[in-house]
Amino acid sequence: MTSHLNRRECRQPLPEARRTCPAPVLRTRIRRTWLLLALIIFALGLTPRGLDAASGPVEFVTYGMPHEHVWGPVFDAFCKKYNCTHVDTDMSSAEAITKFVAERNKPVAYATEAGRAFGPVAVKRGAALPFKNANWAKLPDWAKDPEGHWFAVYAGVPTLLVNPKLVQSVPESWQDLLKAEYKRTFAIKDPRTSGTALATVLAANAAMGGTLTNLAPGVAFFKKLKEAGNLNPVKVSDANIQKGEIPITVKYDHENLVLRERLKAELKLEIVVPKDGTIYAPSVVILNRHAPRPELARAFADFVTSDEGQLLLAQAFPRPVRYIAGNFAVPAGVKARWLPDELYTGRVRSMPDWDQFSETDFIGRWTKEVAP
């Protein structure tokens, strides 16, 4: 009778069983429970983060985050940790957001890198996956969406990239570009679709005394460049720079450092921080709201803002957002590869009122006054 009662009592939920079930029988039951749980986890092939590790590497597809530039070391480390391979298709910020939406029923990509002004665009179009990553509190307010739809990982500074062999003299400011000697020398992408080109216009606008709510000075400056014949219509690409088809363009400081290093054997490119000023332009990551596996997209957000992710970005030349915020230290050996800090002092300004920027207003002005 006692044995029968013990068996019946030991079938009760564990809290009750602990009070009535004999210790040897209870220990056996607990071991069996843990063994069953372990078998279930193994069968599902789940890592502690909830990511599939048993089915083999998956493709972590991105848009506009080329592996060979800033992102290579970051994705190498991330995919080693999360069992994936990185595949990127190069495209503009606007194109990436459009593609997120167009592919929502059959999603392909996980993330894109975009200019700060395109963050709200992604939110408005329902393309962004809201997620406050593990390092959210360490990101400054100007570098993140309050609802988690996008977040900055580093800030680029629009700087002139000049091929000295193709110009009479190296320009030192935005105003210099209006000189007759720079006819058909200056090329940029379309700022209505390119985050880098938009940052270029906003940087010149700030140098001319404009703000994110007063775009007139910058638009007027580029209108003057066009009327003077100083704009070069050639497509801006690293290949065309290498071929000597672009005397002057503007890219972010870290992009210019990477390209100058890569082409140093054949070109002596010069990087100029304009004397009349430029800006810190946050580069933001937007996770695809329709990502094939949202948990993997979230894991990337955690990783890229971690100490490890921020250091990998710093080693590739950009200034990490947490370094700018003051809660991440960059080793002196890494900083030695950046442009000297003194070139930034008094020339590079932050733009705290990004949320007041109107993409619609800018596109309308540019289309009417500058675009062909």
Image (spheres, grey):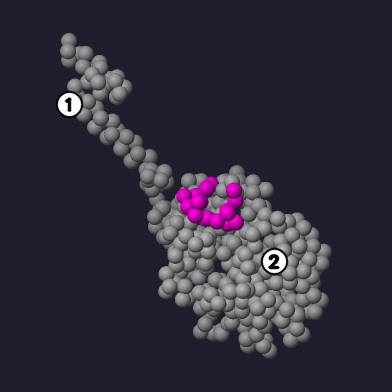
**Kind of element beneath mark 2:** helix
Looking at the image, residue 27 lies above or below residue 218: above
Looking at the image, residue 15 lies above or below residue 311: above
Kind of residue at disc 2: Leu
Q: CA distance from mark 2 to mark 1?
A: 74 Å
Q: Is residue 203 visible?
A: yes
**Kind of element beneath mark 1:** helix
Q: Is residue 132 magenta?
A: yes
Q: Nearer the viewer, mark 2 or mark 1?
A: 2
Segment tinted magenta in the rendering: 131-146
Q: Residue at x 70, y 68 (%)?
A: 206
Q: Which residue is mark 2?
A: 202
The x, y position of residue 194, in whole percent, is 66, 63
Q: Nearer the viewer, residue 162 or 86?
A: 162
The x, y position of residue 49, in whole percent, is 41, 45
* Image quadrant containing the C terminus: bottom right
Q: Residue at x 74, y 76 (%)?
A: 231
In this image, 234 relative to 255: left or right? Answer: right
Q: Is residue 337 magenta?
A: no
Q: Nearer the viewer, residue 279 or 194?
A: 279
Mark 2 vs mark 1: which is more N-terminal?
A: 1
Q: Is residue 59 visible?
A: no
In this image, 338 relative to 221: left or right? Answer: left
Q: Which mark is residue 332?
A: none
Q: Residue at x 59, y 62 (%)?
A: 282
Q: Which residue is mark 1?
A: 24
The overriding secondary structure of the stretch rendered in magenta is loop
The x, y position of residue 223, in whole percent, is 79, 72
Kind of residue at disc 1: Pro
Residue 184's quadrant in the figure? bottom right
Residue 188's quadrant in the figure? bottom right
